[in-house]
Amino acid sequence: MRRSVRILTVVATTGALAAGTAVVANSTPQQGHRTEIRNVIYLLGDGMGRTHVTAARERYYGASGKLNMEQLPNYGAVATYAVEKGSATPALVTDSASAATAWSSGVKTYNAAIGVDAYEKKVATLMEQAHGAGFATGNVSTAEITDATPAAMFSHALLRGCQGPVYSDASCLPKKADGTYENKPADQTLITPIAEQIARNGTADVILGGGLARFEPDDQKALQAQGYQVLGSFGDPALPAQTAASQKVATKADLDGVKKGKVVGLFNRGNLTVEQAKAQLPAGAPEKQEPTLAELTKKSLSLLDGRSKKGFLLQVEGAQIDKRSHANDAAQTLAEMKAFDDAVKAAVDFAKKDGHTLVVVTADHECAGFNIIEKDSFTNAEAAAPPANTDAGNPANNSRPSRSSSANIKDPARSSGIVNGAGAGDPKNFGPATFRTPDDPADVKDGSPEASLWLSYLSGNHTGADVPIYAYGPDGKRFAASQNNTELYGKMYRSLFGMAPRTS
């Protein structure tokens, strides 16, 4: 059952640029001397590391080509680490929740936290501040819209798993060192399911993504009471126990029919369908009715442009880059990189015509240690033993203890061929995946030894590597730096409001 708590508005009055640094700016900051910027589009390739970009470029455009994001004039890097709960001690590998809180609120926080600092204190988000100041706002994702990255712009939760539709201590309350749950906080927002918050706080004017199963009929009623057009159906209120059966996902046709106003469209009960899988489905499959990320981006821009004289803030997430990297599925990862880059093009095309729009493209973290390896080589995951660590020319350089060079051979039990080729039917196979590129001869096929792009993964989890950032438009040069992810909040805040957030 739902919690009895209902959140009519979400107002966060303080934040922090780093652990222990309070943000004085409130949810409706006054604009200072404005630059020519009216709009900010923030595009996030979840899990997208530098190698993801390189591999996608080589796969689709060849070694000398460029992705759309790589053609932007300003380039930098972003450090992504989080902090341990209740402290400022760095946690070197972040998750999406703490990373999204960093750029949306300017604070380092613990992994799994949404819109709260390391000490469980609610912090204002950039989207809440923009909405409160009269900007139009939009939030788009190929994941469930309640998932960590979109959620951090317009909700607050002690744990990212507190998505809904029902409340549970396991999903919403952190555990103490002894394994028992923390006491429920005085601020009930922080343990209110994220879906319930989204449906009632009105923070985003345009909400497009997946996650219909997180919502219930009363959420649709709450949205419609605020003037939203809800595409599809959140279920029949007369059949609360049969919500899944009575819900209807939105479709691209539904979205195409929307011309103006506030809108919520959820196109799948879970995450949206990856483009590679969608292309392989029969013509009548429901998933075929899902719009692409580029189409979601274009529609969001058409709905937000001109909605407010002040301008708009739009966040767009290509979520499946991360999810398919977790799965170590290189083919799906590459296709999702292409889909995300197509959305980047849609945003940049708008910005070029508008002349007053800042476009920022980056990632929350790298996922799975994606690697481009030498053709005809194999990974350590396939090896019978680790590689040699001796230096025949200078024994003083030998590592201790030493390993024989003859031990590093393929293990036939874990290496039965290329994972998207001859070894595709073996779930224990840890071989690389291979892909043809535009530079290859026409007869070269994906999954063959002749394909020039050989890809592997280090793990199934996130890494602590810095991620790339690209920017276009007014203020774009500010992002051409080596910076911390919390700095992105301050830079976007300055672009929207013409002044930096005040701190104490």
Image (spheres, grey):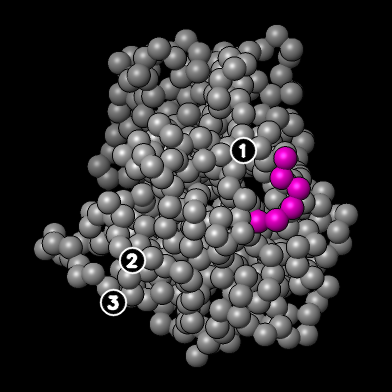
Q: Is residue 457 left or right of residue 445?
A: left
Q: Residues within 10 Å of mark 1 (few under 14, many from 20)?
A: many
* Image quarter of residue 426: top left
| Gap between marks 3 and 1 measured at Cα | 42 Å
| Gap between marks 1 and 2 measured at Cα | 40 Å
Looking at the rendering, the stretch of residues picked out in magenta corresponds to 257-262
Q: Is residue 179 left or right of residue 480?
A: left
User: How far across and how far down the image is residue 346, in percent?
Assistant: 76, 45
**Above or below for 408 versus 97:** above
- Front in this rendered view, residue 100 or 130: 130
**Above or below for 277 versus 179:** above
Q: Is residue 440 left or right of residue 156?
A: right
State which mark lies toward you, 3 or 1: 3
Q: Is residue 342 shown in magenta? A: no
User: How far across and how far down the image is residue 261, in percent?
Assistant: 70, 56
Q: Residues within 10 Å of mark 2 (few under 14, many from 20)?
A: few
Residue drawn at 41 percent across, 82 percent down: 20
